[in-house]
Amino acid sequence: MKKSIGSETLAYPNPVWCVGSYDQEGKPNVMTIAWGGICCSKPAAVTISLRKATYTYGSIVERKAYTISVPSEKYVAEADYFGIASGKNTDKFKDTGLTPIRSEVVDAPYVNEFPLIIECKVIHSLEIGLHTQFIGEIMDIKVDEDAVNSKGHPIMEKIAPFVYGHGVREYWSLDKVIGRSFDIGRKYNK
Amino acid sequence: MKKSIGSETLAYPNPVWCVGSYDQEGKPNVMTIAWGGICCSKPAAVTISLRKATYTYGSIVERKAYTISVPSEKYVAEADYFGIASGKNTDKFKDTGLTPIRSEVVDAPYVNEFPLIIECKVIHSLEIGLHTQFIGEIMDIKVDEDAVNSKGHPIMEKIAPFVYGHGVREYWSLDKVIGRSFDIGRKYNK
């Protein structure tokens, strides 16, 4: 039997992505989000949703650009902090000792220590309610050299991303490959 | 050093969600997607992005409703099949032996064997390019009774969702809790 738990944002699992932006004075800032996802293949695009009250919101509206730095599991505390503190009151890069790097393709910084970087130019924004959704065209992706396979794809073990479970408020690491896509399901083909 | 790999949809990790809909004749269908995410807290809302060429696209346009059934890792083959076959040509529920249940709150079916169900009414749609993004207001969430904790939240171990890595085309299971949110990062608070 299933139990109804009402209208909640409990769609497990959620990504943990750190959104980089510059404020009006050019100070680099980074904020962790779990509300986002890929939304289109051509153009390659990814969404993030933010409350207007966040410091990052104003920066993205002004610069029309953001990066997503995907943290490895060893940076779980830093990523969590990026979701706790506000760039209005502190310099989160200095607080954690991590390094902001200016993107060469969009007007936003990324976190150098994180292995997978997605550089985005805002192409749409949509007011949904408490959150505003920004859709960013992916202009380039940068990956740590030792984390790219021979086909040019990021190696999951090297990226070591982790996921978030809202509700239980837990970060979970990844375990192992349990199947290959467009492959393991073929046994049901008639 | 980081290596540039161009404009690609390689934002790891992606969710694996099975989207349920009814076609014109009322036949239940289900399609796996990885392009989506929560996009708003109030109203609680979640996006899915689909190509117009999919059979599900027409069903959602007509019914203005969909469900997301979150598969447990033991259903990785079924979930993969739901992304391979088209409901235009086959009945994916019959093919896999899984059970469609009519949602009581939206005009769409869900997968009874999957532990976490999100029932959505379409409130926006946006043409981005190859993909159309649907934004669904979450009308209710249903969870297997034994997978809900005392606070009414889905228990991650019981849901056992898995994630997708595009590019490498791998499904990964979750391992363990590596931190609690709004908590493990507090050590950086000054």
Image (cartoon, coloured by chain):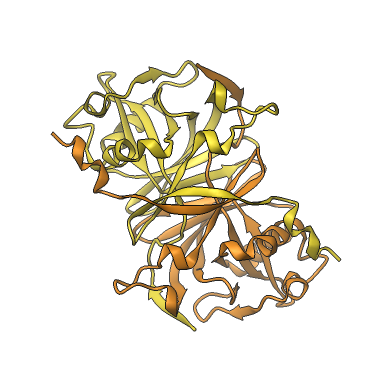
Chain colours: A orange, B yellow
In the picture, the quarter occupied by the C terminus of chain B is bottom right
Point out residue B94 in the picture as x, y percentages from the top left corner: 23, 23
Specify whether B94 is left or right of B70. Answer: left
| Residue visible at 55% across and 78% down in the picture | A103
* A58 displayed left or right of B135: right
Residue A180 in percent (x, y) is at 30, 51
In this view, the residue farthest toward the left is A190
Res. A91 image quadrant: bottom right
Residue A33: x and y in percent read 62, 54
Left or right of B100, for residue B162? right
User: In the orientation shown, which residue stands out farthest toward the bottom?
Assistant: B1
Q: Nearer the viewer, residue A8 or A23?
A: A8
Residue B136 seen by the camera: no
Q: Nearer the viewer, residue B42 or A181?
A: A181
Residue drawn at the location 70% of the way across and 77% of the way down: A26
Q: In this rendering, is residue B72 above or below B190? A: above
Disc tally is 0
Q: Is residue B173 above or below residue A100?
A: above
Please tell me which residue lies in front, B143 or A133.
B143
Q: Residue B173 vs residue A22: left or right? A: left
Image position, residue B136 (x, y; %) = 50, 35
Q: Residue at x 75, y 52 (%)?
A: B183
Q: To which quarter of the image does residue A77 belong?
A: bottom right
Q: Is residue B147 visible?
A: yes
State the residue in front, A144 or A43: A144
User: Is residue A152 shown above or below A173?
Assistant: below
